[in-house]
Image: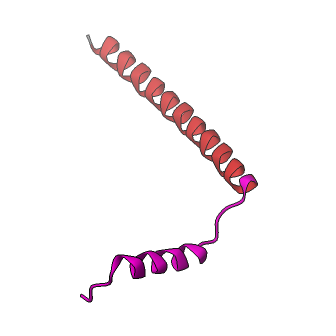
């Protein structure tokens, strides 16, 4: 692999960073809200699944013994 000096490296990093399409403040806000909502929905879903399984197992084990 070819070695470059630190100055050339920093120039390349700066030129590549300039090509990045940075999100707007609105896009970041919308994405953050979407992540929070979907995380909350997932937590509620798994809590309900856990409750159903726990209730079902309690009913089965209580009925058997």
Nearer-the-camera pick, 31 or 54: 31
Q: How is the image coloured?
A: secondary structure
Q: Pinpoint residue 12: horizontal percent, then vertical percent.
A: 46, 80
- Is residue 13 positioned above or below 43 on the image? below
Residue at the bottom extreme of this rendering? 2
Can you say which quadrant of the picture contains the C terminus? Answer: top left
Q: Is residue 13 magenta?
A: yes
Residue 61 locus on image (x, y percent): 30, 16
Q: Residue at x 33, y 11 (%)?
A: 62
- Judged left or right of residue 56, residue 25 is right
Q: Residue at x 48, y 34 (%)?
A: 46
State which quadrant residue 22 falls in. bottom right
Report whether 28 appears left or right of 58.
right
Q: Residue furthest right?
A: 26
- Give the residues in magenta: 1-25
Q: Residue at x 61, y 40 (%)?
A: 36
Viewed as shown, does residue 62 lie left or right of 23?
A: left
59 versus 1 height, above or below? above
Q: Residue 50's x, y, as percent?
A: 44, 28
Location of the N terminus (image quadrant):
bottom left
Residue 34 against residue 10 in the figure, above or below: above
- Residue 3 is a magenta residue: yes
């Amino acid at each position: 692999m070819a070695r470059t000096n630190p100055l050339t490296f920093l120039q390349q990093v700066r030129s590549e960073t300039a090509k990045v399409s940075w999100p707007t403040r609105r896009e970041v806000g919308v994405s953050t809200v979407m992540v929070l909502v979907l995380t909350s929905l997932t937590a509620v879903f798994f809590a309900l699944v856990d409750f159903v399984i726990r209730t079902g197992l309690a009913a089965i084990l209580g009925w058997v013994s």
